[in-house]
Image (spheres, grey):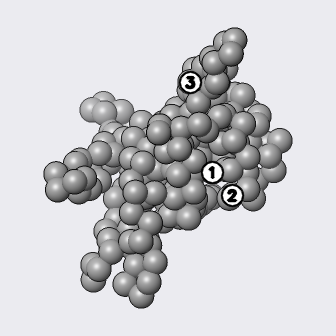
Amino acid sequence: MATPKELVAKIADLTGVPEGTVILHDRNLLNAGLRSEGQRGRGKSVVTYLDAANLLIAVAGSRNVKDSAKTVRDYADLRASAPLIFEDEGAEVKRGETFADAIAALLEAVPRSPDSFNGDDSAWIDVSLFGPTPHAVIEYKKFGADSRDRLQYDRPWKRGEPPSKAADLQFIAKFSQVTLGHVGQLVQSSDE
């Protein structure tokens, strides 16, 4: 069973972000209601795929650790240009209408097919968060496919709202199927 402490340690190890910084991100998300509450007494706290997705978003997208909750709120609800489509036991599954759900779906799916990411014709996934204006992209190539796919995640424009200003500064944070696979495998062990 994966605990919040184990999730923090795994994300720190995979991303190279100091564990103390990831602990603060996790605490900020817990205080803001963006991570599951721990159990009291003898119960053992376990993390969900959404908890892991939110922590990855906070760690990758926050310029300052105090902004963890704001970062998750800014990125988690970004809308997809198209859904992620998976095959699960022969059935087509559509997920990822929002960025947080897409990350949670990838955390769940990648560990189920580790062989897809090995070999000459292997699959790959890159997740990029752009700022300071929140925007995200998931690029991937399925096992055996000749081309790659690209999903964009943006804030939906609302009628009467001025268009977003283009900023001359841009930062990019990126992680791959390596992080998704290892973190997903950790969370998956808590589901068994």
Q: From this viewpoint, which residue is outermost toward the bottom?
A: 120
First reached walking from the N terminus: tag 3 or tag 2: 2
Q: Residues within 10 Å of mark 1 (few under 14, many from 20)?
A: many
- Looking at the rendered structure, the kind of residue marked 3 is Ser
Q: Secondary structure at mark 1?
A: helix
Q: Where's residue 114, x and y in %? A: 44, 66
Q: Are marks 1 and 2 in contact (CB under 8 Å)?
A: yes
> 180 or 79, which is in the foreground?
180
First reached walking from the N terminus: tag 1 or tag 3: 3
> 30 or 164, which is in the foreground?
30
Residue shown at the point (25%, 53%) measured from the top left: 88
The circle on residue 36 is: 3
1 or 3: mark nearer the eye = 3
Residue shown at the point (17%, 56%) measured from the top left: 90
> Which residue was labeled with disc 2?
15
3 or 2: mark nearer the eye = 3
- Looking at the rendered structure, the kind of residue marked 2 is Thr
Q: Where's residue 41, x and y in %? A: 69, 11
- Looking at the rendered structure, the kind of residue marked 1 is Ala
Q: For this view, does 186 lie left or right of residue 135? A: right
First reached walking from the N terminus: tag 1 or tag 2: 2
Q: Secondary structure at mark 3?
A: loop
